[in-house]
Amino acid sequence: MRLINTKTLELHEFFNDNVPPYAILSHTWGTEEVTFQDWQNHQVAVSKQGYLKIKNACQERADVFTSSGQPLVYSRLDTPGTDSATAYGVLCG
């Protein structure tokens, strides 16, 4: 599972039992969403309208804590209402 670090905006991949607590970021699908491939090239990612939406959502999570009082550092993107084969997990697969 790929999660975005809400502090650094870097993607991290986790497997099996190593997945940390995370928030799900739901949003509506726009015309210039950032794909996983886009995210690998910072210049491409920041040129898309969807980048600012992701950045702002991550900044809003800066003061969110888990039930144990730890900062919630990771988020996963969710794109409801779209074809799961083409949209869900485009960035965080």
Image (spheres, rainbow, N blue to C red):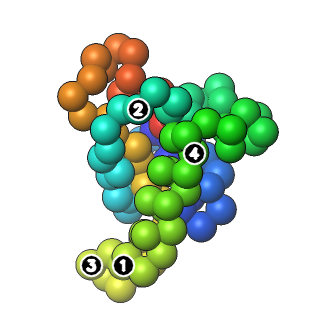
Mark 4 → mark 1, Cα distance in angstroms = 24 Å
Task: Report whether 26 appears left or right of 43.
Answer: left
Dot 4 or dot 1: first in sequence order is 4
- Label 2 secondary element: loop
Q: Nearer the viewer, mark 1 or mark 2?
A: 2
Foreground residue among 3 and 18:
3
Looking at the image, the residue that sits furthest to the bottom is 69
Q: Is residue 71 above or below residue 27?
A: below
| Residue positioned 43% across, 55% down in the render | 75
Q: Which residue is mark 1?
A: 65
Q: In this figure, which residue is indicated by the disc labeled 2?
A: 30
Sooner in the amino-acid sequence: mark 4 or mark 2 = 2
Q: Residues within 10 Å of mark 2 (few under 14, many from 20)?
A: few
Left or right: 86 in relation to 36? left
The reply to whether discs 1 and 2 touch (Cβ–Cβ < 8 Å) is: no
**Disc 3 residue type (three-letter):** Ser
The residue type indicated by label 4 comes to Tyr
Q: Which residue is mark 3?
A: 67
